Amino acid sequence: MSDPISSLSATIEALLFSEGGPVSKKRIAQLARCTAADLDAALFALRERLSGGLTLIETDTEAALAVSAEAAGAVAQAQEGELSREIGDAGLEVLATVLYRGHSSRAQIDYIRGVNTSSTIRTLLSRGLLERAGNPDDAREYLYRPTTELLAHLGVASARDLPDYATISGELAAFDHREGKVGDLKGEPFASHDGNAADTAADA
């Protein structure tokens, strides 16, 4: 039988990876269903186990996976190439959804577009076009919203100043109401995954 702390550290590693940024220790404990003492022990085990590409960053209240110093140069070079690419139709569709629908979870964006949008959202976050915030109605998920940089780039002071805002936002609201399921999704990922070739192609 595997060591419970080792198993817990693996679970926490997966949770931190899926979140893609700093996560409060309180939230990690809730997601992993563990005590604060077990969380501390599992984080220590994870920090000791990680080597090479990743490292564990930890404060008194948060923890996150980060690129290690050894791999930082290679990752920075790869990101330069990624940021030089156009965001493509997928990026434009995600931005339009968030601009006209308002603050949206990834599950809601996935549902509207019909494909997994994780990789697209990561690209938009890295370019400063989207930002994420905690969902006051569900601590398990984030809400994505346009940044001031995006609004400035579009030349508007508010999303409400966008062309046909009332019409398009009204149509999205009607879709939410008609489908019903969209508003009820609580951070559950779309059925497909980024690792699936078909989904990746659809999201490119």
Image (spheres, rainbow, N blue to C red):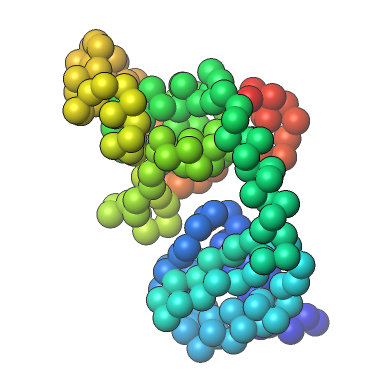
Q: x%, y% of residue 164? A: 24, 11
Q: Which image quadrant: the C terminus?
A: top right
Residue 57: tell me if it is visible.
yes
Q: Is residue 76 left or right of residue 125?
A: right
Q: Quadrant of residue 101?
A: top left
**As displayed, is residue 27 above or below residue 85?**
below
Location of the N terminus by quadrant is bottom right
Q: Position of residue 200 (x, y in %)?
A: 68, 30
Q: Position of residue 177 (x, y in %)?
A: 29, 26
- The residue depicted at 26 percent of the width and 21 percent of the height is 155
Residue at point 72% right, 40% down? 195
- The residue closer to the viewer here, 5 or 13, is 13
Q: Nearer the viewer, residue 113 or 45?
A: 45
Up the image or down, 187 lies above or below 32; here it is above
Q: Is residue 30 visible?
A: no
Task: Give the answer, above or below, for where 170 lies relative to 64.
Answer: above
**Whole-percent x and y of residue 78?**
69, 43
Residue at 35 percent of width and 31 percent of height: 150
Q: Nearer the viewer, residue 77 or 175?
A: 77
Residue at the extreme right: 1
Q: Is residue 59 left or right of residue 98?
A: right
Residue 167: quarter of image: top left
Residue 65 or 28: which is nearer the viewer?
A: 65
Residue depicted at x 69% and y 24%: 201
Disc tally is 0
